[in-house]
Amino acid sequence: MSISHEQRLSDSPYVESVTHGWTLSAGSSIRPAESNWHMVFVKAQGRTHSLAVGPLPTSGKVTWGEGAEILWIKFKLGVFMPHLPVRDFLDMEKPLQGEASKSIWLRNAAWELPNFENADTFVSKLVRDEVLALDPVVDAMLNDQLPDLSARTMRHHFLRATGMTRSRIFQMKQAQRAKALLQQGTSILDTVYEAGYFDQPHLTRSLKQFIGYTPAQIAQTSQPE
């Protein structure tokens, strides 16, 4: 394995998970689409690069070099930076400027770089100083509560806080559920029904778009040796 990592969930209402990893050798792989955005801190060759990594609307290829230490803070859907809406860095990496290896610059202030242990405290401070916010409209809609707002207004909230529409996020989650069913040994035809697809071609197109593999490939790689 060319990447070693440890991951933990978070008690913060703003953070989904925190991951700390190391690249043991150079490599590449197919990565799935991702509906959440991350703050990523990459330490390599004595320097730290801080990035806001936007949601990834489709699957794609990711590559990495050897000898890097990486910290990923994955934010919950609906969490965003008011001064930098998620739609402004959708499907891209945006550098967070600061003094190399020591701090990042967010909303006209310098912030000490977090680590695996204190990432939640770091996020709490960003929330306290209004660098991070949770959009209540997006949060309500993701919990199947429909606010008394126009469709245009709700779309605006989703694009600002997630970079994508609610329907796009649903499609991505549907593909993730289908992948999980196939990995559990559910047949392809049963997965079509249980995940809510129209037919097998619909399932195949969705998984290729959002996961990067066909149903047969996912089922095959999930079989015990």
Image (tube, rainbow, N blue to C red):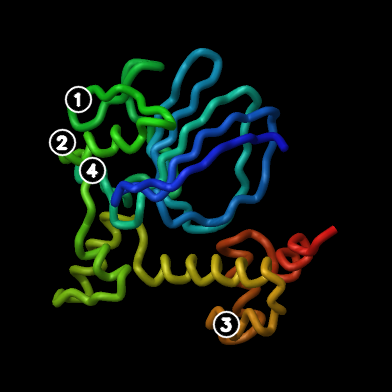
Q: Earlier in the sequence, mark 2 or mark 3?
A: 2
Type of amino acid at the residue the image marks with label 1: Ala
Residue 178 coordinates in the image, percent (x, y): 59, 72
Taking the view exactly as shown, the residue that stands out farthest to the right is 225
Location of residue 184 by image quarter: bottom right
Mark nearer the viewer, 2 or 1: 2
74, above or below 40, in the image: below
Type of amino acid at the residue the image marks with label 3: Glu
List the residue tagged with mark 2: 129
Residue drawn 47% across and 70% down? 171
Q: Give the structural element (helix, strand or loop) at label 1.
A: strand
Name the image quarter holding the N terminus.
top right
The answer to whether residue 138 shows anywhere in this view is: yes
List the residue tagged with mark 1: 109
Residue drawn 65% across and 80% down? 201
Residue drawn 25% across and 75% down? 145
Residue 190 coordinates in the image, percent (x, y): 66, 84
Relative placement, left or right, of 34 versus 141 is right
Give the total of numbered labels: 4
Q: Earlier in the sequence, mark 3 or mark 4?
A: 4
Q: Contact, CB < 8 Å: mark 2 with mark 4?
A: no
The Cα–Cα distance between marks 2 and 1, rounded to whole angstroms, is: 10 Å
The Cα–Cα distance between marks 2 and 4, rounded to whole angstroms, is: 8 Å
